[in-house]
Amino acid sequence: MNPGDIRLVWFPFSHSEPKPYKKRPVLIVGTAGRGADRAILAAMITSSAKRLAGLGPHDVAIKDWQSLGLVAPSVVRAHRIWTADDRDFENRLFGQVKDTLLEEVRQHVRGLLT
């Protein structure tokens, strides 16, 4: 698993949701550590028509979504991030985003930390 990969994961939602996890694609933003101590930072991807119609301040559109194997136009929600373990991910790799998109998402994430 590498930064820029799009993978499937059981992504956590609010405890008030009927199902607290949903299988969805995520963008791997970065990794740290090795083996059992490895942490993977993932950003949620959505194909919500509401999000596509009006991007929020931390939303990044994926322009080449079809070539990545996504089923619909999609957006990375850079403020919806999660630290996961290798075991949380399915083995399926959709594709890898361009370096420019990964860097744009990382800039949003860095901005959240300042």
Image (tube, rainbow, N blue to C red):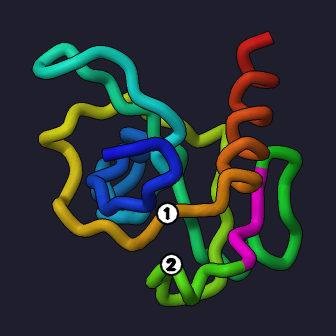
* Residue toward you, 111 or 94: 94
Q: Where is residue 44 in the image (x, y as percent from the top left)?
A: 52, 52
Using residue 37 as the reference point, say whether residue 29 is left or right of it: right
Residue at screen point 73% across, 23% down:
110
Q: Look at mark 1 in the image and give the residue it sits on.
A: 96
Magenta residue check for 47: no
Using residue 71 as the reference point, say whether residue 107 is left or right of it: right
Q: Look at mark 2 in the image and give the residue it sits on.
A: 68
Q: Position of residue 68 (x, y in %)?
A: 50, 78
Residue at screen point 11% across, 19% down:
36
Contact flag, marks 2 and 1 (Cβ < 8 Å) = yes
Q: What stretch of residues is rendered in magenta?
A: 59-63
**Amino acid at circle 2:** Leu
Magenta residue check for 62: yes
* Residue toward you, 91 or 18: 91
Which of marks 1 and 2 precedes in the sequence? 2
